[in-house]
Image (cartoon, rainbow, N blue to C red):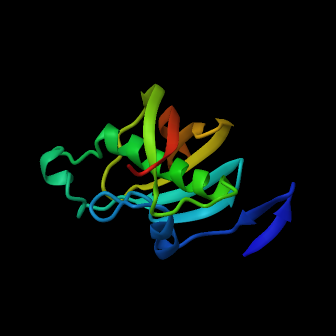
C-alpha cells in the first residue's frame, strides 16, 4: 500500500520478510516484528511482540521476567534503521552498515513483561550527510515505557 504525501511515498506496512531486507539482524537479535506505518524522512511506527520465549527472560529475571532496558533501546534503534533505509535516496546495500553512535536522554518509565506488545515510534529530527538523529519512544498499551534520542550513522563496510 503506497500513497503520495508531501513528495514522499508512504509505506503502509512491512512484514518480517521485508524488515529482514533492511536489517542485518536475525534471531535472537531481530527485535522488530512488523512496521505498521512509515513516512520516509519523517516517522515510522513498528511493533515487537514480547513473549516468554525470548532468550533473555530465563536470566532477567527468573522470578519476574522483565525485558532488559538495553534491548528496548536496541528495538528502538532497529526501528530508526528501517526509517533511515526508507528515507535514503540510495538504499543501503550489503556494502553498508547502520551503526548506533549515540543515545541521549534515555528514560525507562515502566517494565516490559512477557505478553506485552511494544509499539515503537520514531521521528527523524535531522540528517546531515551520513549522521541521522531521531526521537524514539516505546509504548505498551498507550503508555510510554522507554524513550531516547538516538543518533546513528550509515557507513561503508570496511
Q: Is residue 63 visible?
A: no
Q: Which of the two residues, 101 or 94, is positioned nearer the viewer here?
A: 94
Q: Is residue 16 left or right of residue 142?
A: left
Q: Which of the two residues, 106 or 128, is positioned nearer the viewer here?
A: 128
Q: Position of residue 3 (x, y in %)?
A: 81, 69
Looking at this rendering, what residue extends furthest in the top direction?
105
Q: Which of the two residues, 119 or 78, is positioned nearer the viewer here?
A: 78
Q: Is residue 41 visible?
A: yes
Placement of the N terminus among the 4 image quadrants: bottom right
**Which residue corresponds to the image point at 38% horizontal and 49% vertical from the top-left?**
158
Q: Position of residue 36 (x, y in %)?
A: 60, 64
Looking at this rendering, what residue extends furthest in the front direction?
158
**What is the number of callouts on the image?**
0
**Which residue corresponds to the image point at 35% horizontal and 40% vertical from the top-left?**
111
**Height in image: 108 above or below 74?**
above
Q: Position of residue 13 (x, y in %)?
A: 62, 69
**Which residue corresponds to the image point at 20% horizontal and 52% vertical from the top-left?**
56
Q: Is residue 157 left or right of residue 149?
A: left
**Height in image: 25 above or below 65?**
below
**Which residue corresponds to the image point at 51% horizontal and 40% vertical from the top-left?**
153
**Height in image: 29 above or below 147?**
below
Q: Is residue 21 left or right of residue 68?
A: right
Q: Position of residue 54 (x, y in %)?
A: 25, 59
Residue 64 found in image quarter: top left
Amino acid at each position: 500500500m503506497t500513497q503520495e504525501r508531501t513528495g514522499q511515498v508512504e509505506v503502509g506496512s512491512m512484514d518480517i520478510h521485508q524488515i529482514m531486507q533492511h536489517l542485518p539482524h536475525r534471531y535472537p537479535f531481530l527485535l522488530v516484528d512488523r512496521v505498521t506505518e512509515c513516512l520516509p524522512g519523517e516517522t515510522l511506527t513498528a511493533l515487537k511482540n514480547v513473549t516468554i520465549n525470548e532468550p533473555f527472560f530465563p536470566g532477567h529475571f527468573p522470578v519476574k521476567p522483565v525485558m532488559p532496558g538495553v534491548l528496548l533501546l536496541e528495538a528502538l534503534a532497529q526501528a530508526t534503521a528501517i526509517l533511515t533505509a526508507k528515507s535514503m535516496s540510495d538504499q543501503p546495500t550489503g556494502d553498508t552498515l547502520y551503526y548506533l553512535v549515540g543515545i541521549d536522554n534515555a528514560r525507562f518509565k515502566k517494565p516490559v513483561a512477557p505478553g506485552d506488545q511494544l509499539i515503537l515510534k520514531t521521528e527523524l529530527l535531522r540528517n546531515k550527510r551520513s549522521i541521522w538523529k531521531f526521537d524514539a519512544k516505546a509504548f505498551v498499551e498507550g503508555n510510554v515505557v522507554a524513550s531516547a534520542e538516538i543518533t546513528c550513522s550509515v557507513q561503508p563496510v570496511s
